[in-house]
Amino acid sequence: LKHEIIMKNGTIIQGTIIFENTDQMIIKTRIGQLTIEKEFIAEIKESKPLEPLIKFDYTKQVEERINDDLSSTYIGQVMNTGLRRGDFVRVIYHFWADDTEPVFSDSCFISGQNVVYLNGVVSDASLAPTESAIFNLNINLPNSLKYEYITKEIHWDTFD
């Protein structure tokens, strides 16, 4: 759906304009084609594609634990504020030296909802719109590793 047509009476039609002349236009929608007289149209906008927007949920406490075996565990939560499901959502931690050189990275998938994809792959790392999920990353850092600061990011894909 590439266009959003706002009618003078307030009705919003989403679709793709496939034909247009000076008097009317034909719009392909999810339920079929509509022919609309241009005199009843108030505005035409380009629609933004439906995409996931996955962010860290800082309203929940992020926890860092240093275990007895010198490993660190990072526990937190992410949420999808977008309009489409995010698939294979992965949280990545980067460890940086004081000279801004990367020294170590590690990642984990979230514990999200189960999805069976069209190709038969099953995953539990998907996040639907308005949903949130927990991640739990356990990192074994070598004793020789010295880092100054940590950054983190989220990666995801979209599939049908």
Image (cartoon, grey):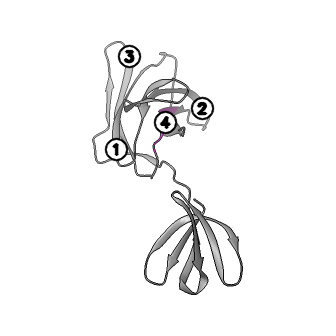
Q: Secondary structure at mark 2?
A: strand
Mark carried by residue 48:
none
Q: Amino acid at mark 2?
A: Pro
Task: Tell me whether circle 2 and circle 3 mark residues in contact (CB < 8 Å).
Answer: no
Task: Tell me whether circle 2 and circle 4 mark residues in contact (CB < 8 Å).
Answer: no
Q: Is residue 29 shown to the viewer in this render?
A: yes
Q: Amino acid at mark 4?
A: Asp
Image coordinates for residue 97, horizontal then vertical, percent: 56, 33
- Residue beneath label 3, please? 70
Find residue 60 and report its image quarter: top left
Q: Secondary structure at mark 1?
A: loop
- Residue beneath label 2, please? 102
Task: Tell me whether circle 4 and circle 1 mark residues in contact (CB < 8 Å).
Answer: no
Looking at the image, is mark 3 or mark 4 earlier in the sequence? 3
Q: Secondary structure at mark 4?
A: strand
Is 17 above or below relative to 136?
Answer: below
- Residue beneath label 1, please? 131
- Residue beneath label 4, please? 87
- Magenta segment: 85-94
User: Disc 1 versus disc 3: distance between alpha carbons?
Assistant: 33 Å
Is 105 above or below relative to 67?
Answer: below
Instruction: For marks 1 and 3, give the one nearer the viewer.
Output: 1
Find residue 27 and report its image quarter: bottom right
Q: Is residue 150 shown to the viewer in this render?
A: no
Q: Amino acid at mark 3?
A: Leu
User: Disc 3 versus disc 4: distance between alpha carbons?
Assistant: 32 Å
User: Disc 2 versus disc 4: distance between alpha carbons?
Assistant: 27 Å
Image coordinates for residue 39, horizontal then vertical, percent: 58, 87
Looking at the image, is mark 2 or mark 4 earlier in the sequence? 4
